[in-house]
Amino acid sequence: MSAVPLLEVQNVRRRFGHVQALDGVNFAVYPGEICALIGDNGAGKSTLIKILSGADRPDEGRILLEGREVSLDSPLSAQELGIATVYQDLALAPDLAASDNLFLGREITQSGVLGRLGFLNRREMRRRAAQQFARLGVNLRSPSVPVSALSGGQRQSVAIARAALWADKVIFMDEPTAALGVMQTGRVLDLIRHVRDQGIAVVLISHNMSQVIEIADRVEVLRLGRRVARIDRASATIEGLVAAMTSESALGESIK
Amino acid sequence: MNWIKSFTGRSHEELREALDSDHARTSQERFNRFIGGGWIFILLLALVAVFWVSRPEQFGSAYNLTMLAVNAAILLVLSVGQTFVIISAGIDLSLGAVLVFSSVVSAQTMLWLSGEPAGTFGTTAGGWGVVAAGLAAGLVSGAAWGMLNGLLIAVARIPALIVTLGSLGMALGMAQILTGGVDVRAVPDRLVTEVGTGTLFGMPILVVIAGSVAIIAAIVLHLTRFGLHVFAVGSNAEAARRSGIRLTLRVISIYALSGMLAGLAATMSIARFSTTTINGHAMDNLSTISAVVLGGTSLFGGVGSIVGTVIGVFIPIVLLNGFVILGIPPFWQTVAMGAVLILAVWVDQLKRRTRQGS
Amino acid sequence: MVNKRSLPVLAAIATVIGLAVATPGAAADKTVALVLGVKGSPFYQALACGAQARARELGLKLTVSAPDQFAADSQIPVVNGVAATRPAVAAVVPTDMQALVEPLRQLHGRGTQVITVDQTISDVSFVQTQVLTDNAAGGRMAADAMNTLLGGKGKVLTITQPPGSAAQDAREAGFKAELKKFPGISYLGPQYQSDDPQKAAEIVTSTLSAHPDLAAVFSTNDQGAIGAITGLRQAGATGKVKVVAYDAATAEVNAMKNGSIQALIAQNPKQEGEAAMEAAAALIAGKHLGKTTLTEIVTIKGSDKAAADKYEYRANCN
């Protein structure tokens, strides 16, 4: 773990009406690690993710990317800074092929006049998509069918591959295996490890404690809008994690 | 191999995989996948074959086949616009009315420019400059209505059905206000004789125009970024937005495109009928929708093709023509058309089920 | 590959083949094609009935077609289809006097003799004869009937179609011209509705609000008449405001029998159909015809139930 976090949140506050969703939360993720973000319902995970993906803005606090303060005004600006989010409802267009989905919004066009008119270079898109899938160990049964024809796990893989293609720093994943069966979950977790091995930091929100223990390098626990624990993989146990989520006294370090 | 793609809406790899894949286990499933691809073309061929065999000199005469194409031309241009709209999961009910409005604006512009008083009957001596001005006026007014539609749908978030229903009424009403309800009957002679009835290498110019529009539209839809975005917006608008596609701009441009095509169809209509037809085109909006749906485009968006629309436009026209030639009583035509439409939507459902069943 | 799912497709194709085979091709020399103005109109149905009966008597092979709407863009494909069959004679009700010129000229160019029925076109140089009623005379008859009903004075409104239909224009013009002979009657002028009874009803009720002393309404067609009497009923003015209406559709005849309409100017669509067939037979036999063939119009007074029954436009051919 290097000293400077890749992405750090300092003392962020966010209120919605009467509800203080984030109450001076701190959070940090380091390059090349899988960090699980856990907490009970209402702990502020979704709000934090929204802010960090640019879909929302904090009332107070700082966000630092590689030590420099940044302002994430919109999902687009977050993406440009290298931060991507894979939502639970996949941001995939079901009728488009995997390669089209991968490059949606950043399509590769032909060179010259045709390119300026907007003609797509599908061969190049397919080639690079195949490269990306190979790099991440994703094995699509057939890359040119509409993604709605793929299994849930493969769809999730495409969504993650897309995020990994465009975000080179941090990828947030909100419950990526929630709707998947056992075998598909295993494949997706493998994919997530591949992504981490590329040097991208992965922040995983999950309610599945055994999954968290299996895959996360580190765990940050939120409760009532604050971080209440940071736990290493080595010292993580299911009971410990649950206890950290639901009460103030926790095993491991407790940092406010 | 792109022609296969534009033909059936799927690439050759998909078709091969659809036919070989271990999911299409039974021959029934294989047949379903096959008919999901090109059945509408087979239906058209079957209709043409039946009518040709029954009345070869009448149905199959050069005159009749040419007339089929000419009668399809205006509706095809309108339906191309509707195809883009429906693929983006929208709908445009205002097309016929926008055509009428644009034809009025176009005809009045040409009349004013050729210096003849209103209420003239017959044709004017307006030159190509006048015709060009009339065309431009029609395109601009059509595009304007389209942009209004797009704005209300994308920015004010009013459902497309309601917005285009409203602009239907407004466009038609304004057309009647502009003319006092009286058709503009004095149009440039050049437009009527050279475009309306003129030919290029033996093909009627109206057919050449419609064909060119269809070809260009197919290229844009399947080979360009704009076309991909149309599919993306229809398939999952939220995903498109999150990908950085400027949704509002896209939606407005799609409706503006269909409005502009209605403006082009308006000039074609004036050329063909040598008059505006304020009381006509009443059912055009529904005809375009059924043509698009018959052609395999899904009303839910995300899937579609221009070639399908072309076939979808020809089926009712061939049906009507065949029935008239055979002397079948008019009401049977209406029944037959309704049946074919239901059949088409049902097959579309089959297609979706086989796709999702994998 | 024949299975449950393909059955409907095959059934549809079989039906079309069946219909095609069942209607054999006709001998070209005695074929007559009749193209009506629109489907589902009692007036044109009655016209077709008259034509079919007379065609049978004359030994002509008649086919009847009609477009979905009374509009050029709907009718022209039908005319094109008829042209493809090259009948000996085509009798067409043109829905637009300008747009139908070229298609009918094409019909003539392919060797078919062309008759117009009930409406006409702006260029009749190639038309063998026009079967018409004298609409201007009908308008004048309406004005005379109006004068009698009102005893020479009162305010009168006309409900008609927007300008552009030759027949409707002529009726209103004839009405207006004749009305000038009756100084006691003040003419409020025409209001337009496009075959929309709803709109016609609204016109009547608004006019009544503006002119509570409205004495009578003249409608140049049946849709306007139906709308007008609805409007009067809503305003409680049935019978107080007199109605003279063109055409004798069943709804109008019933209205006259129960007193909502006081007089009808009836055409004789059956006779128009018969006249068209007689003209066709004459043309086939090589005779020449006058430029116009007029059919009758009669005024039917409210009390004359026998005449009403006689002239009612019957949509079923018996």
Image (cartoon, rainbow, N blue to C red):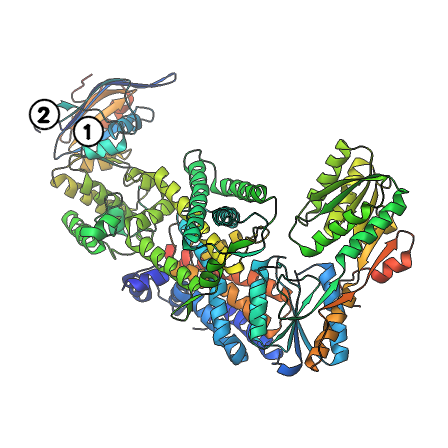
Taking the image as drawn, is residue B211 in sight? yes
Residue B90, picture quadrant: top left
| Label disc, if present, on residue A4 of the rendered structure | 2
Residue B289 placed where, x, y %? 49, 53
Residue C296, picture quadrant: bottom right
Residue most toward the left? A2
- Quadrant containing the C terminus of chain B is bottom left
Residue C183 placed where, x, y %? 85, 41
Can you say whether B116 is above or below C42 in the image?
above
Taking the image as drawn, is residue A205 in sight? no
Is A178 or A44 nearer to us in this picture?
A44
Residue C70, picture quadrant: bottom right
Give the Cα distance between marks 2 and 1. Answer: 17 Å
| Label disc, if present, on residue A219 of the rendered structure | 1
Is B22 or A232 nearer to us in this picture?
B22
Is A110 placed left or right of C255 in the picture?
left
Q: Earlier in the sequence, mark 2 or mark 1?
A: 2
Identify the subunit bearing mark 2.
Answer: A
Residue at x 70%, y 59% (from the top left corner): C41
Identify the subunit bearing mark 1.
Answer: A
Which structural element holds mark 2? loop
Question: Which residue type carries mark 2?
Answer: Val
Is A16 or B184 nearer to us in this picture?
B184
Q: Are marks 2 and 1 on the same chain?
A: yes
Question: Which residue type carries mark 1?
Answer: Val
Which structural element holds mark 1? strand
Q: Residues within 10 Å of mark 1 (few under 14, many from 20)?
A: many
Q: Are marks 2 and 1 in contact (CB under 8 Å)?
A: no
Residue at x 29%, y 64% (from the top left corner): B12
Residue at x 21%, y 48% (from the top left corner): A108
